[in-house]
Amino acid sequence: MEHLIIDCETNETASVTLTADELAARESDALIEQERQATEQTATTNDTTLKQRSDAALVDLRAYNALTAPTNAQTVAAVKLLCRVCIALIRLQLRKLDDVS
């Protein structure tokens, strides 16, 4: 089967004949690249989300730290927040950005 090939660097074109196996390999490579790009986009989005949540957590933790006599409920809420922050920081450090939980 004949296909048009474009060199993206030079913009030169050429017609080439590919076998069914060669065509399948190129299509597979294209799908792999699309999946890689989608994974990279997810990681970038999750990185941004984790950093935004970390910024918000700083504000909340500073407010908790400023309390002279926190209630039991405030202490429990702060501990839960600290756990979430630690998980987010570990995910950022390890670059495990497939999820933001």
Image (cartoon, helix red, strand yellow):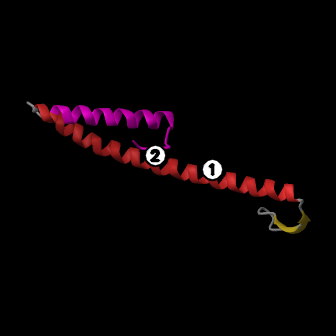
In the rendered image, which quarter contains the N terminus?
bottom right
Secondary structure beneath disc 2?
Answer: helix
Q: Main secondary structure of the magenta part?
A: helix
Please state which amino acid type lies under the numbered disc 1. Arg
Report the side of 16 relative to 97 (left or right): right
In-image side of 9 versus 17 (left or right): left
- Residue 47: which numbered mark, if any? 2
Q: Quick check: 64 above or below 4? A: above
* Residue 33 % position (x, y): 68, 53
Query: Residue shown at 85%/55% (left/top)?
Result: 21
Residue 6 in the image, given as x and y percentages of width and height? 81, 66
Q: Residues within 10 Å of mark 2 (few under 14, many from 20)?
A: many
Q: Which residues are magenta?
A: 75-101
Instruction: Give residue 88's position: percent from left, percent from top.
Output: 39, 37
The residue at 51%/51% (across/down) is: 42
The label shown at residue 93 is: none
**In the figure, is residue 18 to the left or right of 67?**
right
Residue 15 in which image quadrant? bottom right
Spatial CA span between label 1 and label 2:
16 Å
Q: Which residue is mark 1?
A: 36
Looking at the image, tell me whether mark 1 or mark 2 is earlier in sequence order. 1
Q: Is residue 77 magenta?
A: yes
Residue at figure coordinates x 32%, y 44% from the top left: 55
**Magenta-colored stretch includes residue 87:** yes
Residue type highlighted by circle 2: Asp
- Name which quarter of the figure residue 72 lies in: top left
> The residue tagged with tag 1: helix, strand or loop?
helix
x and y percentages locating residue 16 in the rendered image: 90, 65
Tell me the crowding category of disc 1: few under 14, some 14 to 19, or many 20 or more residues within 10 angstroms, Cα based: few
